[in-house]
Amino acid sequence: MNILLIGSGGREHALAWKLAASPMLTRLYAAPGNPGIAQEAELVALDIADHAAVAAFCKDKAIDLVVVGPEGPLVAGIGDDLRAAGIRVFGPSKAAAQLEGSKGFTKDLCARYGIPTAAYGRFDNAAEARAYVEKMGAPIVIKADGLAAGKGVTVAMTLDEALGAVDGCFDGAFGGAGASVVVEEFMTGEEASFFCLCDGKTALPFGTAQDHKRVGDGDVGPNTGGMGAYSPAPVMTPELIEQTMREIIEPTMRGMAEMGSPFAGVLFAGLMLTDKGPRLIEYNTRFGDPECQVLMLRLKEDLLVLLNAATDGQLAHVSARWRDEAALTVVMAAKGYPGTPEKGSVISGIDQAEASGARVFHAGTAVQGGKIVANGGRVLNVTATGKNVSEAQQKAYAAVDLVDWPEGFCRRDIGWLAVEREQRK
């Protein structure tokens, strides 16, 4: 099979690495890719926002399946446009991608189909949102309705912080994504990530993970796109997985089908595990980043077989098996992230890190003068496996310390919650 992978981050490097191992693969192309992905795929200079150009490339290269990594193209309708041109795509339609593209859409779906989630209000102007915040009090959660690269959420512990977040959204801090705002009840509990592959009818459980959103050790500082993750999530017991499928995933699949937008692709549920059971925080309609990296290291199956089954409505006939090991990834970011990252600094030692047994996925790199340089906020994902999270953590940080990049930084406590659990056993 000839495959085109859309995207350029660490998630896409992990997908490229896994797809490249498939016996079914003939040629793997990636647009636009990155220097790490170039080790697994042929990079093509396509404007992925130009869907007609992508379709023309697919026809020219006899592409059998397009795998869309990031959320932006999905929300922009690349799946619809390629399918209209007769090209198979793994990823939801534009209408189904609203589950990520509009937090308000998802909250309304939850209300309609009885899916457990936080109480909320939706607002299109600052005055009404501010009045609602003042009525509800703090702590409270403020979310830009649209896509904001994982940074449009403020967990406000004070009223002033909440009102400031509302004003920031309506003043353009997140561009058009903040033109509408969702204000949510503050939920308490432990967060977990739950993934399913979906084909419009069937949802196949596809692993659990926990990530670390805040930039600093001890979960302090602003939210980021994710500073690290590990899988599996020990807190997600078989009983909790079954309850999540029954109360959250299956009603969502049913509701989307009834609304005429059956969901096919990756359904990634961010969960809050409360004392009343799992509640949905939000949906993503693609693999998480950096959760994808740890899932790919643990997946036993041929990923291409599973993506084909999801694309063809055949998920009921396949299964997903996982290695017993835990996997953990540490995000190495450029100084300044999640604000304005410093670009252009030289990175070395990646080969040594991989020689130690880790896998280093490129997330925001470029090549300048034959050297790897930082070209984004989140730059590398240093990923390792072990018999448990503690061992995976030790191996990942040993590899991090082999990367020579003074201008980079990382959290030093990824996996701390799972490690504490393991130490208590």
Image (cartoon, helix red, strand yellow):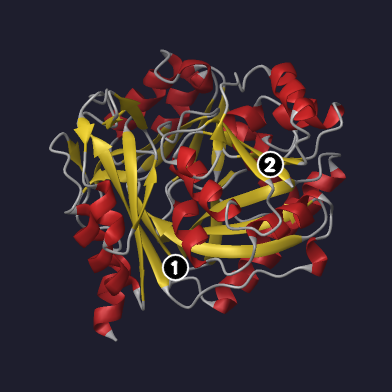
Residue 189 placement: quadrant: bottom left
- Residue sitting at 43 percent across and 73 percent down? 234
Camera-nearest residue between 22 and 107: 22
- Residue sitting at 60 percent across and 21 percent down? 46
Left or right: residue 382 versus residue 241 is: left
Of the two numbered discs 1 and 2 in the rendering, the one whose residue sits closer to the viewer: 2
Locate residue 340, reporting x and y percent: 27, 22
Residue 166 in sight: yes
Camera-nearest residue between 257 and 362: 362
In the image, which disc is placed on residue 3?
2
Number of numbered labels in the structure image: 2
The image shows residue 39, relative to residue 174, as above or below, that is: below
Left or right: residue 362 versus residue 78 is: left
Residue 102 in sight: no
- Residue sitting at 60 percent across and 44 percent down? 286
Locate residue 251, reporting x and y percent: 74, 56
Locate residue 256, reporting x and y percent: 78, 45
Left or right: residue 353 versus residue 243 is: left
Q: Quadrant of the C terminus?
A: bottom left
In the image, which disc is placed on residue 233?
1
Q: What is the crowding at mark 1: few (fewer than 14 residues within 10 Å), some, or many (at least 20)? A: many
Q: Is label 1 in a helix, a strand or a loop?
A: loop
Residue type highlighted by circle 1: Ala
The image shows residue 23, relative to residue 338, as above or below, that is: below
Farthest-out residue, top? 171
The image shows residue 206, relative to residue 218, as above or below, that is: below
Locate residue 13, reporting x and y percent: 48, 44
Farthest-out residue, bottom? 425
Left or right: residue 281 versus residue 229 is: right
Residue type highlighted by circle 2: Ile
- Contact, mark 1 vs mark 2 (Cβ under 8 Å): no
Q: Earlier in the sequence, mark 1 or mark 2?
A: 2
